[in-house]
Image (cartoon, rainbow, N blue to C red):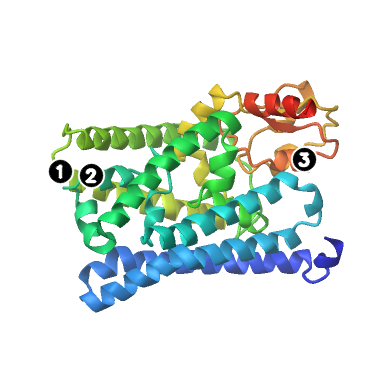
Amino acid sequence: MKNTKSFIQPKTAVKLLKFLLIFYITFCLVVAFLNFVVAKNANAEAAQFIHTLYEFFENELKTMLIIVCSVLSLFAFPNIAKRKLYKLNLAGFICSAVIIHVLLPLLAGNREIYYTAMPLPWATTGLQLMAHDSSFYVRHIPLWGLSGISAAVVFFIVMNIFVFIATLLFGRRVQCSSLCLMNGFASEIWAAAFPLAGKKKKLSVTAKKALLVFRLIMLLVSLTLSVIWLLYVGGIRLFQNMDALAQFEVFKYLSVELMAAMVFWVFWTGRGYCHYCPLGTFLSLIAKLGKQRIATDITSCTGCGVCTTVCPMSIDVASSAKKKEPVTDSLCVGCGHCVDACPVNTLKYETVFIQKANKTCKFV
């Protein structure tokens, strides 16, 4: 790593990461506006061009950015050799992007299969595809064909099962720090670039309380949408205007999720949206069953406070470390930044399964 670092200095790597983050935000806003607003009133040829551009942005361009920015991140941090969990995060997102945005579209013949990559209760697109009279299904059956829709539904079901089981065994680290191609990937590949404006800030007590309330509201709204669509697929109609419900979900995504996440990137942190992500909140409950935690008693805490400083979720890891108490905060996304940063290696990311697996491996 010492030899490769000579090619790009840390400050240069950070500047490049900031430039690519600005490029991504700008391109994303422009393409989203074209796809969700302009295309609706454009002629067939223009609408098709916009749609193709949107697909390229979501698949090939996003994958290329994840790969390039992951490599740049290896140069951006001077102590990257010690950041073992962080490097695993980057590797996980590269693999996820290649599989979901490159390989699966080729194999399934559906370039928009990523619509169903995020499990419930984050989005109900997978459920909407199961309802043959939903506007989402009607709009996409001519574009994807029956085989493309079937592939998307199967992928949606598999992703839900996989993520829930993996979270129970390995905690939130699987989805939030390896698979999430909505906000998780950005928070890791551009970790050295946040915020774009001003200095890094920690949350105040008031801000934490406000986000907690909004977090619960988002979870309630998302769970309600999921239940309504699940019942609708099962033949029970609780909401008369399902198209309006689907439009509301699109509005929710564009406003309080996509746009808000980008504002956080500019002025605060890459994990801003993670503070109230409904999927993350739901998975935190599953992770609690698997006893996800940051162990703090491997050695002895020196009280340096670096673990708290590097935590992107503003969790006070140091206070627990001083008392040798495990960190079990439901906001923990399992990124491992605190574990990597500890100078005396007193921290360790664990779940019951990981702990048992490690003990078993010692005897093999």
Q: Read off the residue under disc 1.
A: 241
Kind of residue sitting beneath label 1: Asn
Structural distance between the alpha carbons of marks 1 and 2: 7 Å
Q: Nearer the viewer, residue 357 or 284?
A: 357
Residue 212, x across and y down, in percent: 48, 32
Residue 171, x across and y down, in percent: 58, 32
The residue under the point 37% across, 54% down is 254
The residue under the point 23% across, 67% down is 40
Q: On the image, which quarter does residue 349 sit in?
A: top right
Q: Read off the residue under disc 3.
A: 306
Q: Quadrant of the C terminus?
A: top right
**Mark 1 or mark 3: which comes first in sequence?**
1
| Mark 1 or 3: the one toward you | 1
| Mark 3 or 2: the one toward you | 2
Q: Nearer the viewer, residue 204 or 32?
A: 32
Q: Read off the residue under disc 2.
A: 245
Res 209 seen here: no
Q: On the image, which quarter does residue 266 sit in?
A: bottom right
Element marked by disc 1: loop
For residue 138, above or below residue 178: below
Q: Quadrant of the N terminus?
A: bottom right
Kind of residue sitting beneath label 3: Val
Residue 291, x across and y down, in percent: 60, 23
Q: Are marks 1 and 2 in contact (CB under 8 Å)?
A: yes
